[in-house]
Image (cartoon, rainbow, N blue to C red):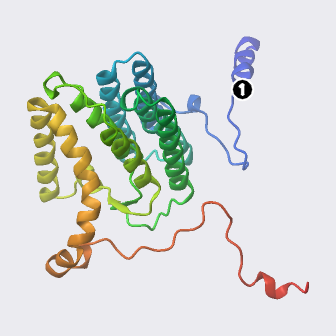
């Protein structure tokens, strides 16, 4: 090997990733082009999610509220895509999980908080700041709790707490619908701003379970594929005919499915069986304190 080639290799080695646990880290340079694309494809969608969220923030400060709301919708699509692509190509990883949460905090925590601050409550400066802080704090708590309580054995059909993209969709859909010319302008009363800035934020930190509808995103079987295609076509047609109303129906309908699911659970269980309702909720581990051994005090001779 020539000195020049050796020098190039040594310069690149300075940037080699090292695992804090001592596990071997394979550099992307050691992978083929196809394998490299497979492992980086989900991250590409994550970065697009982050870029769209940041662009929404910048547009909100310039009072382009409709475009800012549309970019949050783009972030939601990118967030769905990165998870779907990661599962499809088998490239899920702890790094991808953390990267996705950081992008979500920008797109579904920071961006909706700024929209609440700049659009929903412009005439109430103190309240608008408090509402923005409250939203951002709830979104950060929701994402952090999700990261530390991931249970591989949990029922993947349900989320614990309102997912941050769905919460952001409420703000996005409301702003987009009310900013249309045919809506007749925005009513500056406090009812709508408080509802869209407080209710979804509170639902993010609760333990109420919301359907994930992952079976629609990963259909298995002819019936599942038919449901996915029909649902996708209905959404596309609705967005073409009346995007504002369609966004409101999807965003608010997703929130309402949780209480409606609780109310209709006895009937669904009787008619469709126990698999049609959510399983009994298990106690989640603490997100603040480490688990302690209850028998550890028995070996302690300290009075």
Name the residue rendered at 38%, 53% in the picture: 162
The residue closer to the viewer here, 200 or 292, is: 200
Q: Is residue 132 visible?
A: yes
Left or right, 82 with respect to 232, comes to right
Along the viewing direction, whichever of 168 and 10 lies nearer the viewer: 168
Disc 1 residue crowd, few under 14, some 14–19, many 20+, Cα 10 Å: few
Quarter the N terminus occupies: top right
Asked if 3 appears above or below 97 in the picture, the reply is: above
Residue 15 x, y percent position in the rendering: 69, 26
> Measuring 21% from the left and 25% from the top, which residue is drawn there?
185
Residue at the image point whose x is 21% and y is 45% from the top: 250
Q: Position of residue 181 (x, y in %)?
A: 17, 21
Q: Is residue 77 left or right of residue 138?
A: left
Q: Residue furthest top?
A: 4
104 up-or-down from 22: above or below: above
Residue at numbered disc 1: 13
Residue 47 position, x and y percent, is 46, 29
Give the percent coordinates (x, y) of residue 200.
Answer: 38, 48
């Amino acid at each position: 090997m020539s000195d020049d080639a050796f020098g190039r290799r040594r310069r690149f080695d300075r940037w080699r990733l090292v695992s804090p646990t001592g596990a071997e880290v394979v550099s992307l340079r050691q992978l083929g082009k196809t394998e490299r694309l497979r492992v980086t494809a989900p991250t590409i969608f994550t970065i697009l999610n982050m870029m769209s969220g940041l662009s929404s923030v910048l547009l909100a400060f310039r009072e382009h509220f409709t475009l800012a709301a549309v970019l949050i919708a783009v972030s939601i699509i990118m967030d769905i895509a990165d998870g779907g692509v990661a599962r499809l190509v088998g490239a899920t990883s702890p790094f991808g999980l953390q990267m996705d949460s950081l992008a979500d905090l920008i797109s579904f925590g920071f961006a909706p908080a700024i929209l609440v601050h700049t659009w929903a409550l412009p005439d109430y400066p103190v309240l608008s700041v408090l509402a923005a802080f409250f939203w951002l704090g709830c979104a950060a708590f929701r994402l952090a709790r999700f990261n530390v309580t991931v249970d591989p054995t949990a029922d993947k059909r349900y989320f614990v707490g309102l997912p941050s993209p769905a919460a952001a969709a409420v703000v996005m859909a409301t702003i987009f619908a009310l900013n249309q010319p045919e809506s007749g302008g925005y009513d500056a009363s406090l009812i709508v701003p408080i509802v869209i800035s407080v209710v979804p934020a509170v639902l993010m930190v609760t333990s109420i379970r919301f359907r994930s509808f992952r079976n629609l995103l990963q259909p298995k079987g002819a019936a599942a594929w038919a449901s996915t295609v029909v649902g996708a076509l209905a959404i596309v047609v609705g967005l073409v005919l009346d995007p504002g109303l369609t966004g409101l129906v999807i965003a608010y309908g997703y929130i309402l499915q949780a209480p409606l699911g609780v109310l209709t659970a006895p009937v669904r269980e009787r008619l469709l069986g126990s698999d049609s309702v959510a399983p009994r909720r298990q106690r989640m581990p603490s997100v603040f304190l480490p688990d302690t051994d209850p028998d550890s005090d028995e070996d302690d001779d300290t009075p």
